[in-house]
Image: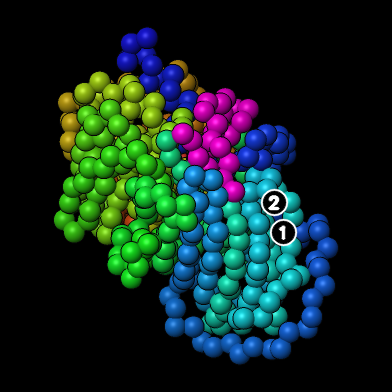
């Protein structure tokens, strides 16, 4: 099959979410409901009894955002780890909290997560609720946490990583990134984290689905130390910048104001690096992929420069791109994966998916990591913008290929449906992409044509500036747009959106 056709087939593995409800050996079926449960739904399991704790003092927080300090001790050979974790959580919700809800994605795998101990401000907690193969951990607080209060959660737990599935039909089984293959071990959404809280609605934690992403994140600071207990010394690709650990037996990474902290570990990685301004760019790839690895590095560095100019400053010290040993691509903070399949199909030109998707995933550092959104209920806010950012990249770096990009990206779909479709209403992987990614990019192009480049890019810069470090909604997006233009776009809204904003 020629390269002009094969990448189109492989678009069916593009940008799906990372976790499924499954065991390390046999994945259970996905949920069958067509709508997500209420984020505030109470757990069905009865909480275990506990002793009445001594009240603890609550102080006004000095923290701007939550702090995660994580010590990961990994047995690389056994694909297992012991973790000690501390979360310092400032209550900026504006409401008094009587419990916290954390997402624990490794618990979706049977036997994959073992909570050994849990304490709040040094008081042991035993009446937490964590059902088998559930991602929801609810921690009742020893006393209510008022607005501007801070608490410290300490926990220890064990991880047994699942084996990643080599290939799967994304309409039947969710492609998997968390876990291990013969060539890499991936820690993604691997630590318990406090999910966002929305006033009047409660904790935001949606169910996983067959495709797309379901998690929503607050920004946080991360301090992650990695050591190996079996004598292995693999390469570590990480979200954060490496800093001195103070120990010859461990490595330490720090990331400020990120949504997530990802790691990919391998004994066979090769690495290429480049500096863009004050940002260190890394590309990690497997042996015999030197040409593709250099192309990935160049694409990431170029896209970093283009998007900094067009949207606003990149917020981290490093940006790491990693060849994924799976049929998927996925963004994390200061970090992204790109499928081995795109490496295999690279033809030494920029007119292919290695470059296209490299630009897409880099754009997610603006439209996901910086400006976040509810990925389950309003996925177009990051995916349509990241897809259209591919066109912006080609315009700047390869202007002769812009027409190619439009023709190559938009194949075999007509009247796909509304851009503001929830992940649960996508109608399947391919229809979901057509609605949210591709029709979304087409809408943005028409919006740009309607108001002109000057207004369009001023609007995007302002949108980025106003919501970097925050979560935006569709209403926020169009509010900022209308601050820049009074142009009538009612026809575009009727054509592309089912809701009014």
Q: Residue 10's quadrant in the figure?
A: top left
Q: Is residue 311 magenta?
A: no
- State left or right for residue 52 relative to residue 403: right
Residues marked 1 and 2 touching at CB (< 8 Å): yes
Q: Is residue 170 magenta?
A: yes
- The main secondary structure of the magenta stretch is loop
Which residue corresponds to the image point at 42% horizontal and 59% vertical from the top-left?
Answer: 226
Front residue of 242/359: it is 242
Q: Is residue 88 left or right of residue 64?
A: right
378 over 468 or under it: above or below: above
Decide which of 225, 361 is in the foreground and name it.
225
Local SS, label 2: loop
- Above-or-below relation of 70 to 146: above
The N terminus lies in which quarter of the figure? Answer: top left
Q: 187 or 182, which lies in front?
A: 182
Mark 2 — residue? 134
As measured in the structure, the alpha-carbon distance from the residue carrying label 1 to the one carrying label 2 is 7 Å
Q: Measured from the top left, where is residue 371 in percent x and y?
A: 40, 56
Rendered location of residue 340, percent (x, y): 38, 29
Measuring 70% from the left and 34% from the top, which residue is drawn there?
29
Residue 33 in the image: state x and y as whole percent.
Answer: 72, 39
The stretch in magenta equals 160-182
Residue positioned 22% across, 29% down in the render: 291
User: Which residue is most to the front?
Assistant: 231
Whether residue 486 is visible to the viewer of this picture, yes or no, is no
Q: Which residue is mark 1?
A: 130
Foreground pick, 183 / 490: 183
Q: Residues within 10 Å of mark 1 (few under 14, many from 20)?
A: many
């Amino acid at each position: 099959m020629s390269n002009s056709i094969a990448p189109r087939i492989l678009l069916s593995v593009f940008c799906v979410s990372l976790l499924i409800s499954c065991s390390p050996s046999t994945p259970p079926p996905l949920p069958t409901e067509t709508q997500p449960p209420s984020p505030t739904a109470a757990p069905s399991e009865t909480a275990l009894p506990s002793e009445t704790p001594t009240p603890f003092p609550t102080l006004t927080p000095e923290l701007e955002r939550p702090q995660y300090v994580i010590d990961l001790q990994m047995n690389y050979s056994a694909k297992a780890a012991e973790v000690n974790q501390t979360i310092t959580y400032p209550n900026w919700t504006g409401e008094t909290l009587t419990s916290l809800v954390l997402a624990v994605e490794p618990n979706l795998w049977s036997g994959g997560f073992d909570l050994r101990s849990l304490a709040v401000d040094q008081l042991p907690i035993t009446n937490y609720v964590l059902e088998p193969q559930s991602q929801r951990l609810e921690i009742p607080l020893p006393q209510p946490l008022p607005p501007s209060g801070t608490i410290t959660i300490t926990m220890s737990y064990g991880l047994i990583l699942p084996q990643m599935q080599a290939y799967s039909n994304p309409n039947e089984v969710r492609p998997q990134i968390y876990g291990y293959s013969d060539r890499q071990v991936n820690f993604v959404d691997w630590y318990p984290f406090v999910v966002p809280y929305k006033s009047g609605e409660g904790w935001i934690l949606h169910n996983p689905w067959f495709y797309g992403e379901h998690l929503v994140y607050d920004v946080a600071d991360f301090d992650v130390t990695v050591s190996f207990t079996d004598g292995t010394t693999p390469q570590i690709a990480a979200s954060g910048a490496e800093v001195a650990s103070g120990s010859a037996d461990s490595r330490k990474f720090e990331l400020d104001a990120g949504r997530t902290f990802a790691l990919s570990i391998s004994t066979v990685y090769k690495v290429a690096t480049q500096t863009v301004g004050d940002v260190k760019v890394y590309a990690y790839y497997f042996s015999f992929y030197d040409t593709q690895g250099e192309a990935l590095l160049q694409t990431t560095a170029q896209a970093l420069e283009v998007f900094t100019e067009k949207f606003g400053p990149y917020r981290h010290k490093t940006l790491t791109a990693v060849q994924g040993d799976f049929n998927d691509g996925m963004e994390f903070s200061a970090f992204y994966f790109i499928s081995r399949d795109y490496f295999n199909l690279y033809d030494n030109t920029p007119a292919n998916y290695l470059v296209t998707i490299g630009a897409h995933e880099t754009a997610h550092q603006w439209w996901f990591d910086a400006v976040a959104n509810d990925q389950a209920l309003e996925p177009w806010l990051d995916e349509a913008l990241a897809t259209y950012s591919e066109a912006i990249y080609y315009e700047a770096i390869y202007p002769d290929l812009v027409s190619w990009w439009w023709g190559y990206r938009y194949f075999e779909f007509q009247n796909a449906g509304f851009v503001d479709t929830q992940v649960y209403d996508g109608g399947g992987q391919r229809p979901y992409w057509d609605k949210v990614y591709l029709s979304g990019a087409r809408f943005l192009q028409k919006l740009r044509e309607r108001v002109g480049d000057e207004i369009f890019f001023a609007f995007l810069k302002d949108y980025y500036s106003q919501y970097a470090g925050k979560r935006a909604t569709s209403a926020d997006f169009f509010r900022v747009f209308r601050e820049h233009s009074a142009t009538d776009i009612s026809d575009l809204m009727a054509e592309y959106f089912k809701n009014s904003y």
